[in-house]
């Protein structure tokens, strides 16, 4: 079951990125009380100041009893020099704006009970309208009316959202730390197997019962083929399979969390505290730890759609899932690494860039599966932004990404949370190569860990390149497009410079001894047996 869970989660990983929006802030105050609400505007139509201090306060007049398609029934004295709120409907936004402008209003807010869209018009209408125009939720107006009553002061402003957000740094730290820790853990496990005698004196490493070795090119092709099939099934049967993936993730992540914490406690020398019931021995530490891990997964499963804080728990479970995956899956040789990473690079690029030419809505299969139908709460078509006007049932999304809120997206987060997103696959796939390099350092008894450190640095440079291209292009990037070449070329270069390409390429199949002209792989291999003795 654990192996199936690992495969299914791994099969639907990806990278996505931020979306630039046209949200702004409506600041309402009355004496010492103040509150902010989400509004949508059009940058090319009604430029707004970038800070609250630069925004001019106006008295807010609630006239949602009219749609203001004409000036009948509206007294200029009532709205002159004030911010006016009317209902959406019956006529274009530009017509409402021109009527409000003729009446002397300084700002027009259009309240909506339906999906908010950033106002649009043709070029000639842009030139005619001289007052700010924005859309707001009708429920927000009712909330402001309840809190402030009459005499509300309104200020509109649109804080600039920087492309370079602190969330990118957090994402970079999470990814490099996870890859480095996963690779180190894999190498440490390999070293322990040698030290405990599970590895033969000739350098052969036996497979741990928890390991899933990949030592056959055929297995790699089958694995990638199954991943393609899984992604296509998710695309066509998303509404059903998403709950299967969520359930599997809860099981796999709780198991991974248990493995990570248990390994840490074992390293610290924490006692088990065993007891026996009906001739069955139980570990107190294991029972407490299992209960805690299961509880954490259950909490995530119950509150998985609470965007404001659940991302912390999802990232925690994602990190331990990736760590355990990198430790568990063992690539036996650099040849297998090249085949697997190359195939997954093609897989990533094909399902991100090529599939939009075949889908009816022009959206890539991978992005559609990752975000789910309407999962982001926002749709963008050119300069048009849509935001739900009323609370909606959250769309289920696959738990296969790290999510960090965009700290600089103040206005956007009022409307809906904005996240920087990184797929688990962009951590796991290069992490498998880093783990192989770490194990190879053990096999050749490298004290400086040259292969491991160089592959970690290559991963860091690949991630920096990915984020740089994403920021310059303004588009999400398939990170494997940069990570795979960086890590593979770096590893091959190190092996070539050290004259160990033959050994590095062949690796170990877990069935045969690593053929090498080096001295015995570990010091234990030279000292455990007398010179004339034949090792077992």
Image (cartoon, grey):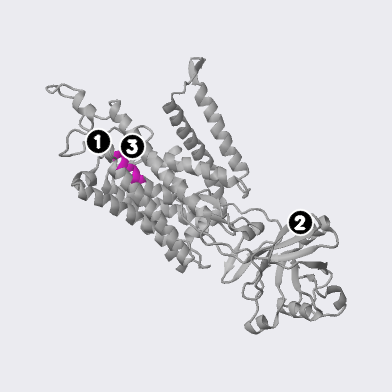
- Which is nearer the eye, 145 or 219? 145
Q: CA distance from mark 1 to mark 3?
A: 11 Å
In this rendering, would 414 be left or right of 244? right
Q: Which mark is residue 187?
A: 3
351 left or right, relative to 196: right
Q: Given the current orientation, which residue lies at the most extreme left position? A: 532
- Residue 368 lies within the magenta run: no
Q: Nearer the viewer, mark 1 or mark 2?
A: 2
Q: Is residue 227 above or below residue 197?
A: below
Q: Are discs 2 and 3 less than 8 Å apart at CB? A: no
Residue 516 badge: none
The one nearer the camera, 154 or 278, is 154
In three-dimensional space, the C-alpha distance between marks 1 and 2, rounded to whole angstroms, equals 65 Å
- Residue at 62% from the left image edge and 75% from the top image edge: 44
Query: Residue 63, percent across and down?
Result: 83, 69
Q: Earlier in the sequence, mark 2 or mark 3?
A: 2
Residue for badge 1: 445
Taking the image as shown, residue 160 lies to the left or right of residue 285, namely right
Residue at 17% in and 35% down = 519
Between 484 and 51, the one lying in front of the other is 51
Would you call the spot at circle 3 few (<14 residues within 10 Å), some (14-19), or many (20 or more)? Answer: many
Marked residue nearer the N-terminal end (1 or 2) = 2
Secondary structure under tag 1 reads loop
**Residue 177 horizontal/vertical position (percent):** 43, 44
Q: Is residue 445 above or below residue 476?
A: above
Residue 34: assigned label: 2
Q: Tell me where the magenta segment starts and ends, as one range.
A: 432-439
Q: Pointer 2: residues within 10 angstroms few (<14), some, or many (20+)? A: some
Which of the 4 image quadrants contains residue 299? top right
Asked which secondary structure carries label 2, the reply is strand
């Amino acid at each position: 079951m654990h192996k199936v869970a690992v495969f299914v989660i791994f099969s639907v990983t990806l990278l996505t990125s931020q979306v630039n929006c046209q949200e702004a802030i409506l600041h309402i105050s009355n004496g010492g009380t103040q509150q902010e609400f989400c509004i949508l505007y059009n940058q090319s139509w009604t430029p707004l100041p970038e800070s609250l201090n630069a925004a001019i306060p106006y008295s807010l007049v609630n006239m949602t009893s009219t749609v203001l398609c004409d000036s009948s029934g509206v007294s200029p004295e009532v709205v002159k020099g004030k911010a006016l709120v009317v209902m959406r409907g019956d006529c274009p936004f530009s017509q409402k704006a021109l009527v409000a402008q003729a009446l002397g209003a300084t700002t027009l807010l259009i309240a909506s009970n339906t999906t908010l869209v950033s106002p649009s018009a043709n070029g000639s209408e842009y030139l005619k309208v001289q007052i700010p125009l924005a859309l707001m939720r009708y429920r927000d107006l009712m909330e402001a009316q309840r809190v402030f009553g009459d005499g509300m002061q309104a200020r509109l402003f649109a804080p600039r959202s920087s492309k370079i957000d602190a969330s990118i740094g957090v994402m970079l730290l999470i990814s490099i730390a996870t890859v480095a820790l996963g690779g180190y853990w894999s190498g440490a496990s390999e070293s322990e197997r040698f030290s405990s005698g599970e590895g033969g004196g000739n350098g052969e490493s036996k497979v741990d019962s928890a390991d899933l070795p990949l030592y056959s090119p055929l297995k790699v092709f089958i694995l990638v083929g199954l991943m393609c099939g899984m992604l296509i099934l998710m695309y066509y049967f998303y509404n059903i399979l998403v709950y299967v993936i969520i359930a599997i993730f809860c099981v796999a992540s709780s198991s991974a969390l248990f493995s990570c914490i248990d390994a840490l406690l074992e390293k610290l020398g924490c006692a088990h505290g065993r007891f026996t019931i009906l001739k069955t021995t139980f570990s107190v530490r294991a029972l407490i730890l299992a209960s805690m891990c299961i509880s954490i997964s259950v909490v995530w499963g119950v509150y998985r759609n609470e965007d404001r804080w659940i991302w912390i728990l999802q990232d925690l479970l994602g990190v331990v899932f990736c760590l355990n995956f990198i430790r568990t899956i063992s690539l036996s040789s650099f040849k297998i690494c090249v085949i697997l990473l190359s195939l997954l690079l093609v897989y990533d690029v094909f399902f991100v860039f090529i599939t939009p030419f075949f889908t009816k809505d022009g959206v890539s299969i991978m992005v559609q599966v990752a975000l789910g139908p309407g999962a982001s709460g926002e749709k963008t078509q050119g300069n048009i932004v849509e935001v739900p006007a009323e609370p909606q049932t959250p769309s289920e999304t696959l738990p296969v990404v790290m999510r960090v809120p965009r700290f600089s997206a103040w206005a956007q987060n009022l409307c809906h949370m904005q996240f920087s997103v990184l797929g688990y696959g962009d951590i796991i796939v290069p992490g498998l190569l880093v783990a192989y390099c770490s194990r190879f350092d053990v096999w050749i008894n490298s004290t400086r860990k040259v292969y491991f450190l160089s592959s970690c640095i290559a991963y860091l440079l690949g991630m920096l390149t990915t984020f740089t291209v994403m920021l310059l292009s303004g588009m999400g990037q398939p990170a494997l497009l940069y990570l795979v070449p960086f890590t593979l070329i770096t590893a091959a270069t190190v092996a070539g410079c050290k004259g160990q390409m033959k050994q590095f390429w062949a690796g170990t199949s877990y069935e045969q001894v690593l053929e090498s002209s080096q001295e015995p792989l570990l010091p234990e291999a030279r000292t455990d047996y007398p010179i004339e003795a034949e090792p077992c």
